[in-house]
Amino acid sequence: MNALTTDKLFHNGAIEVPMGYSKAGFMLDDTYWGYVIRSLEGPSVLVKTLQGVAVFIGAVFALAAVGMWLLPSSIVSDGVQVIKIGLTVFLAVISAFCFRYATRGSEVELEFDTNVRELREVVRNHAGRPSLIGRYDFKSFSGLFIDRERGEKGHGALMLRYRNSTTLLEVAYGPLPRVEALRDRLGKDLIAVPA
């Protein structure tokens, strides 16, 4: 038996994942302002690799910015000093961007704020500090559906369609009974008229 937070499958209780289904692919946490959906799949190898490369590149650029001032200059003139200052600033900015990308985290979570009626895409770093990626009003979504073609049998991905475009936002992936229950809850929240 897997403990899950539920609304029939999500509110304050534990249910059993039906036989033949693997563990849940997402976690839903209720908050005082709405709820948060987090994936349990973990970051992809590509993201972890890119963050490692970003740390290396950031360190190289930071060392180059500092090292330029440690080496004796053959020509000490005002023109060279201005170029060195400009190049140092340029290298430091690139280094800062690389370190920012490498430390910002890799797990995207979706925050559904039912009070403000908005969806926020947030990435938490390793210390738990959030970085906002995107903010969408509930009215900006035109569709909510389950993609049953993705993944293994008996699983599906809950998708939100942004406006009337081909842009899709994956909300959750997991066993169909949980995804269907989440779809019903999201459907109520997205089309509910605020009081």
Image (spheres, rainbow, N blue to C red):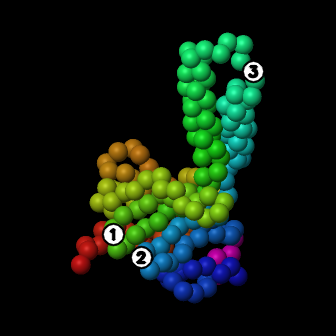
- Identify the residue position indicated by label 1 in the image: 116
Vertical order, 34 against 104 (above or below):
below
Question: How many numbered callouts?
Answer: 3
**The disc labelled 2 sits on which kind of residue?**
Trp
Distance in Å between CA atoms under marks 3 and 2:
59 Å
Q: Secondary structure at mark 3?
A: loop
Q: Residue at x 68, y 36 (%)?
A: 62
Q: Quadrant of the N terminus?
A: bottom right
Q: Which percent across, then down, holds residue 173?
A: 57, 61
Q: Which percent across, then down, holds residue 73?
A: 71, 18
**The disc labelled 1 sits on which kind of residue?**
Val
Seen in the image, is 68 located left or right of residue 173? right
Are dots 1 and 2 in contact, CB under 8 Å? yes
Magenta span: 16-20
Seen in the image, is 153 located left or right of residue 187? right
Q: Residue at x 60, y 14 (%)?
A: 77
Are dots 3 and 1 in contact, CB under 8 Å? no
Distance in Å between CA atoms under marks 3 and 1:
58 Å
Q: Quadrant of the C terminus?
A: bottom left
Q: Main secondary structure of the magenta part?
A: loop
- Identify the residue position indicated by label 2 in the image: 33
Vertical order, 144 against 75 (above or below):
below
Q: Which callout, 3 or 1, points to the residue nearer the camera?
A: 3
Q: Which percent across, then down, holds residue 183?
A: 45, 68
- Identify the residue position indicated by label 3 in the image: 72
Q: Secondary structure at mark 1?
A: loop
Mark 3 or 2 closer to N-term? 2
Q: Which percent across, then down, holds residue 37?
A: 53, 67
As for residue 179 lying within the magenta part, the answer is no
Please indicate, yes or no, whether residue 24 appears anywhere in the rendered image.
yes
Q: Secondary structure at mark 2?
A: loop
Mark 3 or 1 closer to N-term? 3
